[in-house]
Every structure is written in C-alpha cells, then in structure tokens.
C-alpha cells in the first residue's frame, strides 16, 4: 500500500486561534516572522542589484533567527524559503 501525498487544507480562523492560544507568545511571533521572511526571500528575482541582494540577505537572516526560536520549541515548525504555506 502506498501513501498518497498530503494536500494542505486550510483551517478555520477560530481553530487557528485555539491552536495559537496554547503556544507561548514568543513562538507565535517567531512563526509570523518566519512566514513573512520566507515569503520575502522569493520576492527578489535574478539578476539582483546590490540593494536587492542586501534586502534578500536581510530576509534570510530574519528567517534564520525565527527558525532558531521555532526549532528550539519544536523542530517540526521550521520553515524553508518558499515553503511558507504548509
């Protein structure tokens, strides 16, 4: 028997709020920061000028900081650039 790939299903806002109420506020903030940074990384397309490269590096650094907090809480919460919608 082979397993089919999981399809992401949106959850209602009230369910997300209930899940969020069980987590520390610092973890919730890190999750929001990681989502925003992961989205920001792929906003830039090659060829990059020096300013765009600096902005992309800043977004990667923000993602790394948020992932460090999320990984300490639960390694399953880590995000990769471009993988912000699970």
Image (spheres, rainbow, N blue to C red):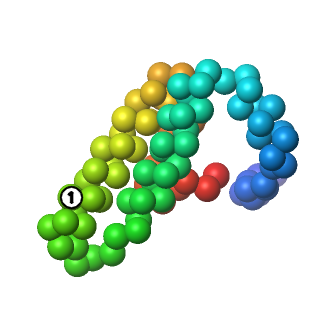
Q: Residue furthest bottom?
A: 47
- Residue at image position (76%, 32%) is 19
How far from the left and from the top, in percent, is residue 23?
66, 24
Say left or right for 44 vs 78.
left
Res. 74 in view = no
Is 24 rendered above or below residue 13?
Answer: above
How far from the left and from the top, in percent, is residue 12?
84, 49
For the residue carrying disc 1, how many other residues have a C-alpha within 10 Å: few (<14), some (14-19), or many (20+)? Answer: few
Residue 52 figure quarter: bottom left
Pick the front one: 67 or 55: 55
Say left or right for 60 vs 18.
left
- Residue at image position (50%, 30%) is 70
Which residue is under mark 1?
54
Pick the front one: 3 or 7: 7
How far from the left and from the top, in percent, is residue 29?
54, 34
- Residue at image position (29%, 59%) is 56
């Amino acid at each position: 028997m082979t397993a089919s790939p999981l399809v992401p299903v949106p959850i209602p806002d009230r369910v997300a709020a209930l899940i969020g109420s069980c987590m520390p506020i610092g973890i919730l903030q890190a999750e929001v920061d990681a989502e925003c940074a992961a989205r920001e990384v792929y906003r830039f397309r090659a060829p990059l000028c020096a300013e765009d490269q600096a902005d992309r590096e800043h977004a990667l650094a923000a993602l790394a900081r948020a992932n460090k907090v999320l990984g300490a809480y639960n390694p399953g919460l880590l995000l990769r650039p471009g993988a912000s919608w699970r």
